[in-house]
Image (cartoon, rainbow, N blue to C red):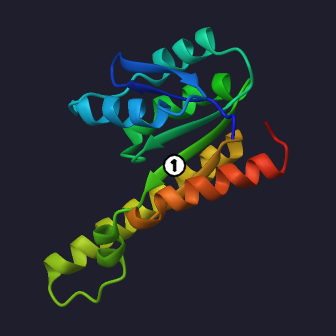
Amino acid sequence: VGDHVGVLAFGRDVRAEIEPRGTRDQPRRIVNLLFDLEPLLQAPNYAKAFATLLERHRRRALLILFTDLPEESVLEPLLQAMPVLLSRHLVLVAAVRDPEVESLATSRPSTSVEAYEKSAAASFLTWRDAAVARLLRLGATTLDTPPGNLAARVADEYLRIKALGRL
């Protein structure tokens, strides 16, 4: 109650923003903004987005970054940009694990193609777990969860942070 919530959507550039407010219509405004955004296939510019956040929001806040923790070439810029954000704010990285990749990684292959798919899926999950560990070492809280659990896990983590008085 009384918390201010906003959104910053970005890719290569900041694409849309709603300043944090604690008004009753703020959730509707955020949902409408997100609904209207069209996805773009471009690498996110974390440094630029984080600089925008730091410039506009000086007061300590919980920032939730929804991402998919993709391949290493996309993750490295996030890892490089994260310390400047963590110097002032709490950061929660919320990601969805792909259940199909999980299933492939634990499957029993019966063909060479299935064995290759299992190996690739297992390698990706190992890399992903290492990426989560790197984010944790930097000081970010990280949730890496199946799709149906993400909203509840983010809400639970927010309530835990509030209860601990970390904001």
Query: Can you tell which quarter of the image residue 57 is in?
Result: top right
Q: Position of residue 17 (x, y in %)?
A: 43, 19
- Front residue (pair 98, 90): 90
Label 1 neighbour load within 10 Å: few <14, some 14-19, many 20+: many
- Front residue (pair 70, 10): 10
Q: Position of residue 66 (x, y in %)?
A: 46, 42
Depicted 146 relative to depicted 72: above or below: below
At x 35%, y 16%, the residue is 13
- Front residue (pair 1, 105): 1
Horizontal side of 68 relative to 49 (left or right) equals left
At x 27%, y 36%, the residue is 35
> The C terminus lies in which quarter of the figure?
top right
Depicted 91 relative to depicted 157: above or below: above
At x 71%, y 41%, the residue is 139
Secondary structure beneath disc 1? Answer: strand
Q: Position of residue 50 (x, y in %)?
A: 54, 20
Q: Residue furthest top?
A: 55
Depicted 55 relative to depicted 117: above or below: above
Q: Which residue is mark 1?
A: 94
At x 37%, y 37%, the residue is 31
> The N terminus lies in which quarter of the figure?
top right
Q: Amino acid under label 1?
A: Ala
Number of marks drawn: 1
Q: Residue furthest right?
A: 165
Query: Can you tell which quarter of the image residue 104 is in?
Result: bottom left
- Front residue (pair 122, 20): 20
Horizontal side of 114 relative to 28 (left or right) equals left
Q: Position of residue 142 (x, y in %)?
A: 60, 51
Depicted 133 relative to depicted 80: above or below: below
